[in-house]
Amino acid sequence: MFCHLNVHSWHSRMQGVTPIGALLDRAKALGMSHLALTEINGMWGFINFVRLARQAGIAPICGSHILTGPPGEKPAQDLILLVENQAGFENLCQILSRLHDEPAHDILPLLERWQAGLIALCPDPPLLPQLARVIPQGNLFGELRPGLGTEPMLAACKQLDLQPVATGEVYFLKAVEAPLYQLLRAIDRNERLSQLPTWELKPGLHYFADEAEMERRYPGDPQAIGRSMTLAARCKTDWDFSTTIFPGLSPGEDAEAILRERVYAGAAGRYRVPLSAPVRERIEMELSLVCRKGFAAYFLIVADIVKESPLTIGRGSAAASILSYCLLITQVDPLRHNLAFERFLNPDRTDMPDIDIDFAWDERDAVLDYVFKKYGADQAAMVANHVTLQPRSAVREVAKVYGLSNEEIITVTKRVHLVFAAAGRPTKQSYPFIDAAVPLPTATATATPHPLHIDDTLAEVLELSMKLIGIFHYPSVHSGGVVIVPDAIRKHVPVLTAPKGVPIVEWEKDQVEESGLVKIDILGNRSLAVVRDCLHDVNLYRRPTEHLSYRAIKPLDDPRTTAIMERGLTMGVFYIESPATRQLLAKAGKVDYEHVVIYSSIIRPAANRYSDLLIERIHGAPWEPLHPDLDFLNESYGIMVYQEQVALSARVLAGWPWKEADMLQKIGTKKSLRPLVPTMQEKFIRQSIERGYAPEMVQQVWRMIESFEGYSFTKAHSASYARLSFVCAYLKAHHPAEFMAAVISNRGGFYSPYAYMSEARRLGISVLPPHINRSRLKWKGHRRKMRVGFMEIRNLQRSSIDATLNERKRGDFSSLDDFLRRVDMVFGDVRALIRAGCFDDLEPERSRPELLLQLMEHHSGSDQSPEAGSIFHGSRSASAEAPPVHLRQLSELQVYQMEVESFGYPLSSHPLAPFKALLGRRMQTAGDIPRYVGRAITLAGICLTTKTVKTRKGETMEFLTFEDQSGLFETVLFPGQYKVFNDLLRWEKLFVIQGKVEESYGVQTVTIERLTSLARMASGAKQKDAALQSP
Amino acid sequence: MGRPPTVSASGGGSSPPRILHARLKNFEVQAERLIDPALATRPIAIISSGAQDGTILTLSKEAIQEGLSRGMHVSLARKVSRRTILLSRNIALYQKVQSVVYRLLSRYSPLVEPASYGQFFVDMSGTNGIFRSPAKAGHLLHKDIAHQINLAPQVGISRNKLVSSIATQVVPAGPVLEVAPGEEADFLAPLRSTALPASRERLVGQALRDLNLVIIREVQNLVSYERLAQAAFSVHVRQVTAQARGIDTSLVLPPRWKQQRHRHIFERYTLPADTNDENLLHNAIRHLADVVGYQLRTQHSIARDVRLFVHYTDGYERHVSGSILQHDASTVTAILLELYQRANRRRNRIRAITVDAARLRPYAQQIELFDSGLPRDQRLSAQLDAIRKKYGLGSIFMAASLDR
């Protein structure tokens, strides 16, 4: 009997080509009862391996193939470690973590410390005696590997009285896959195939051989082959990850008692005291379930992390918990808003519930620091992401090995992506139809698709790359997942340090959850930082007693907040600022909290028709509930809007248990579950009909479930986010300058900084240019004015900004001369400040060219000697003196260009300003649109944002938001026009738009019939080469 | 435009030097239209490569009207104008046309310098006796090129190459523009400062923009204040000052003079198919080493400056430098292989490899006190060279270099 004890799967970080499932299938087919997974210096896919092995009925053995030595060089030490028991697993995790820290570390001292519970197989005769000194004899074996001579190893074993074991050293399933492995090595080493060192070339021998083949390889050592089974039987295979590993509290602390105490203390702040019966009942119900499941400590840890910041919001279903609300983890009252706790935690749920917390984006690192400080890097690490080769990356990497040029690669990858997307997982036959048949994504109907010529090399590249899809390429850091354990994390999972310096575990999110480790998602949110900065600016001019705080804001019934939301003036407002949501707000007209929660959930990629239906029903269109049993849909006008409604429908109609119903609500959003859709659809419909529901109604419900494809939200999540939306809207309504300044300063959002600045102007706020004495790093808003921050100036280093701000604390600068004397700054940075206009106010008599000349003179050192005098007629602070050379003033157009160079957009004028003469009276403005309903209109505008969508027929169309000097306007490019004009949108920003004005529920949209580039129209008007003309 | 330039009436005697500059604007476009008259009125653009990131090198005015511009990416150009015909560079054609024009210009003066494609300097000093005046020569030359080659040149005449070449950029309607001696600065004054070649230096261009020095008169004004000019133009101050005043002392250099100054061995090996296979590439290097080594030995030279160029499929080129101080076959091969390893840092496929050996110096062999004969490598090279001399260069090669 034989089983493989040296096997590498595609999780082996570019050193294995076979999926775990395929290895297990092969092992099963060959009648093997055990299989070891020994990835190179890691156990990246171990949890998946255990799950799949159990499904296949094979005993999973944990191990690792240890290679030590400088990266890229021939390994100095080479051995296999197999786990015999739990202690061995922990020791292997420790050893692997240490090797991640230092790949060239000598294995002997590591084994000296952590050899308990580990079995070592060594193929290297010289290393064997050294290992014999640190590993007990019964746990050390000589390894007979394919391609290595058996004689030296047998001699060494004899000399040391050790037993040999034969392994297959498997890197691929079939011998023909050897070139694929070599290709992986070339990709990983960033080399050409012909440059690979010989020790990296694994010949065909390294395939998944059967016992007969092994006997042929080692005819004189049948015991060495049979010994593999003896060893396998000694290894640990009864893996159990059902026990969650909770970070402990201090010894003697009772987590349940502490949780109860803190929840009631928090409830006293959240609710009126004495607590009402419903509040008490809900708290007791949740406490009972949470304690029964053993999650008390988890809540306490999350609450402890949350207290690090005054501004947080809970994501996901955790907002449905009154415990979270009382512990200040979430900000929405689940009782008041009827949020069902079952979605978060129900008696059937066996996996860990997730509590995801948003912090201000720029505070997230500090919170992570707190976690690492509190629990130590020994106890905490971040979750990894496993970046695998995808169709595009696979083609790109293989093509690089084959020496294809960048443009050749791009031409292929653009098409490959489409083809693979259409064909699902590619097959060997799928690449030929890449040829010409598939146009590039931006190609228009009129464009001739450029045929892609597939020569022999390219055909080989495509063929090979398709076989690499799914292979683990490299680890990265998960956006916010943190794992905390009660003792040393390196005992539970191998840990490595990511390039950005944080410790990460080897496993990605799913394996972490499956392994029983507690994961907390600490995520960044820009709008929380916007609220914080806005409140800071507002409170700057208030007495401490009048300070406005996040939790004190009561936006829900505020008339000014309601007014801006009703008109869809929500640019910059968290979660409801996209053109689609702004239009929905304006069309619906109802903007109370419950409705905004619905709107936040219904704007989904596949739910367009339901949002139209929603507006109709809000405006009074009659509707009947689909069935009395579906009364939970009544809160959203009979339309399925929230994730939990999907699960409830499955429970009510098909009679599914919670676990299965939960699965149904996940299939739309999790790619990995997509293949289950047809089965679940059939089952849902069949079982619903069997339970006596009308087939037509069941079909209607299924269509609504289908609209959850892409992404969707629970009601608790939307309710939690809607609360932040209202706070932002409140701040925008009451403190627009402070709010818009904070929006621009924190970047992100749906629009560009220019678009937000324009929005501020429409709100009546003056935008002041940067000022050397008044600006700060970020934008600053106060009353009806907003000052550009230094951060907006391009090519200005942060250190120079800090130096300026520090020096300014000693007093304002009186002139450029004063600035140059007081601040030691590189030429380029002062130049950027002058060009941005920072000194205009300080030096009103002098033009920017004159200031720049002074800077140049200062920089060249020619004004350092007193007798040399100054260029400005001998006076050092000669701002009032006329220079001896005449430097002409900047024209309006030059100022415009300088602003574009300094900020990326014009500050003192509108982007359409240079075209004023051209536009003349022939065109209308955004302000005229309401008067043109049903009529043709011609407008000029700058494109702020676009959103491409698919119609039901699968055609592409686009929604575009434009702006002119009078306001914003929304437009739509239907599929016919989209085909003609979409190319133009890729490289132009300023357009002349001809179309027809349509109106729906009082909201106007322009249906585009023709788009023209404004710049091209202007250049057509004055076509001449001005390069050498005199002005 | 500023005031019209003065057209001098050239006299004889000790007249100042007169340099004529002939510019064939959009030379590549004109050359393409020369061989295909159907392109005469159609928008055409010459591109560096048909690939996505190829760019437009030059284009016809019809193509400009279509919205295209120099430097625009081919992928974008295709979207902006589907009417425009995008032509890949036809180097052979341009070289042919260039040599035809050169031969024609050589009839006017022995001193003709081809500056770049479609641009020539002709030193007309002392030719008044033949052509009566440089202006007349300019008109005649213009007529010759137009009638004999069917190309349209602009001609500028002045005391130096700088002003003549700027003159051809700003020739208005007429084909010939002469700047009278002593009026160079006045001629330049109203022109845009970007016409000065120095403005293409990053630092100078930035200073011109920052100080809003739009026309050359403003530059002339600034450079009259030495300290200010130094502050503004830094290390380029002398260059800018001279150019703004229309001063240029460089000579017209005919090609053979250049060649004499730059005698070199130039060998290129184009691979049968683009490849990044190290074995094939090493073979190609060995072949080049054979050829270059043979030439060095027959010329009894060493090369103090050897540059090895690697030309990739995507048009990218990389080169490294070294020297060949011993010219036996094994040494030359070792040096070129070492240069190749340093030059080829990419994984991309290679199309060709070039070796340019310059600064050739006589090979001075150390004389041995006791004659022990030539070293083995040198004896082998000598034997091989003897065979090549008798039967031709391609008659014998190292076996390793044949498998290519």
Image (cartoon, helix red, strand yellow):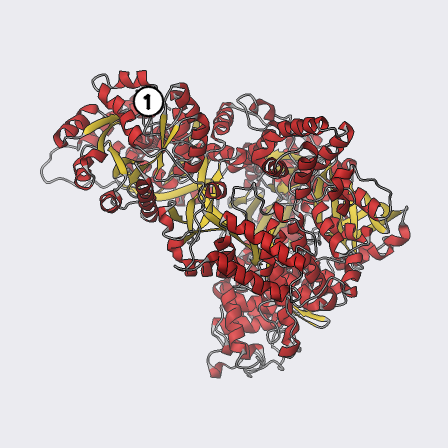
Residue A1020 in view (yes/no): no
Q: Is residue A664 left or right of residue A226?
A: right
Above or below, A24 against A542 in this view is above
The answer for which chain carries disc 1 is A
Q: Residue furthest left?
A: B370
- Residue count near mark 1 (Cα–Cα under 10 Å), binned few <14, some 14–19, many ≥20: many
Horizontal and vertical percent for residue A948?
70, 42
Quadrant containing the C terminus of chain A is bottom right
Viewer-closest of A735 and A761: A735
Horizontal and vertical percent for residue A605?
69, 41
Above or below, A823 against A668 in this view is below
Quarter occupied by residue B324: top left
Quarter occupied by residue A644: top right
Which element type, helix, strand or loop, lies under badge 1?
A: helix
Residue shown at the point (76%, 47%) measured from the top left? A635
Viewer-closest of A82 and A764: A82
Quarter occupied by residue A593: bottom right
Horizontal and vertical percent for residue A111?
24, 43
Viewer-closest of B72 and A771: A771
Quadrant containing the N terminus of chain A is top left
Q: Is residue A562 left or right of residue A647?
A: right
Can you identify the residue that label 1 sits on? Answer: A205
Residue A910 in view (yes/no): yes
Horizontal and vertical percent for residue A611?
77, 44
Q: Is residue A192 left or right of residue A818?
A: left
Number of on-image labels? 1
Viewer-closest of A190 and A691: A691
Question: Which amino acid, mark 1?
Answer: Leu
